[in-house]
Image (cartoon, helix red, strand yellow):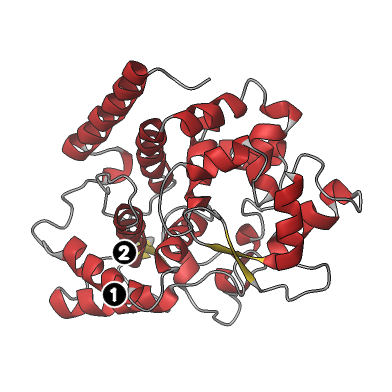
Amino acid sequence: MASSSSSRSAAAAAVVLVVAALCLHGVTAQLCADYYDSTCPNAFDIVKRVLINAHRSDTRIFASLIRLHFHDCFVQGCDGSLLLDSLPGMPSEKTSAPNNGSARGFNVVDAAKAALEAACPGVVSCADILAMAAEISVELSGGPSWCVLLGRLDSKTSDFNGSLDLPAPTDNLTVLQQKFNALNLDDVDLVALSGGHTFGRVQCQFITDPLYNFSGTNMPDPTLDSAYRAFLTQRCPRNGNPTALNNLDPTTPDTFDNHYYTNIEVNRGILNSDQELKSSPEAQGTTAPIVDQFAGSQDDFFAAFAQSMINMGNIKPLTDPSQGEVRKNCRRLN
């Protein structure tokens, strides 16, 4: 059930206090909000200028950049490993099925890195650029802001096999919960971070299962709203272009808001993994009440999303100089 107005405000205020505390005192692995204050004080503004410029010619870029941060953190931690190009004996995570042809925005990360190297050479890591870019992208799209905790180093390895196990649009709720729990992220994190699908685009190949072969039945998802299903089948016919793009949120596709959850409430989740949060039998008593809460209160969603982004950003951050480095070029090792 959606919370009352007073409880919404209390929840939002509580998360703001938690975020403020993290910014003031830091967390494990020595991440802190003021990490670059003396070594590259304009780092955040530099990244922001690059993103604003990129957005002028690419309205999708904000959603693409937050996805890069998500896909980076879920594979061997938030260490910039996704950004590495392939090396002999070390295939790039970019080339794995969950990323190849759909992960994008690498050129914008390159541009941010080049601008930072010009201002403060060898200081700001590529992993931290992804973390800053995610927050900036959400805030500039109308979403919440949060204190970005910084101080990560870049990995010297990538994990192609690990990237094969990223949360997938075809995953059921049980599998999603297992993947999130393995990284110490709970159901609130799962539902809140899934709300990142409130903006951006998705290729037809990722929505064909609920349209034509739900759970291997060779039938559509019976919970999907029939009018919405008819609309999507026109956009993505069975033998159509698999890379054709569709709005993740048909109402406000470029705005960060809580329409993702109001869409799910009326069985208009475009990905199977989205609708599972509400319609799966296992969702009752677990994720479905959280969906209801966020659908009823954008403030609650924004507060939870900010905290969950901090939680995700603290997945095994690399801070040991013997294990990591600050790459001069995000695509290759120094």
Residue at which label 1 appears? 113
Please state the horizontal and vertical placement of residue 167, each as a whole percent of the image: 62, 50
Q: Residue furthest right?
A: 218
Residue 215 visible in rendering: yes
Q: Nearer the viewer, residue 58 or 85?
A: 58
Q: Identify the element where label 2 is drawn.
A: helix
Circle 2 residue: 129
Q: Position of residue 4 (x, y in %)?
A: 40, 17
Q: Within 10 angstroms of label 2, few (less than 14), some, or many (20 or more) residues?
A: many
**Which one is nearer the viewer's eye here, 258 or 191?**
258
| Amino acid identity at mark 1 | Lys
Asked if 86 appears above or below 279 in the picture, the reply is: below
Residue 226: x and y, percent? 77, 46
Q: Is residue 198 above or below residue 41?
A: above
Which residue is at the far front?
227
Q: Residue at x 26, y 32 (%)?
A: 16
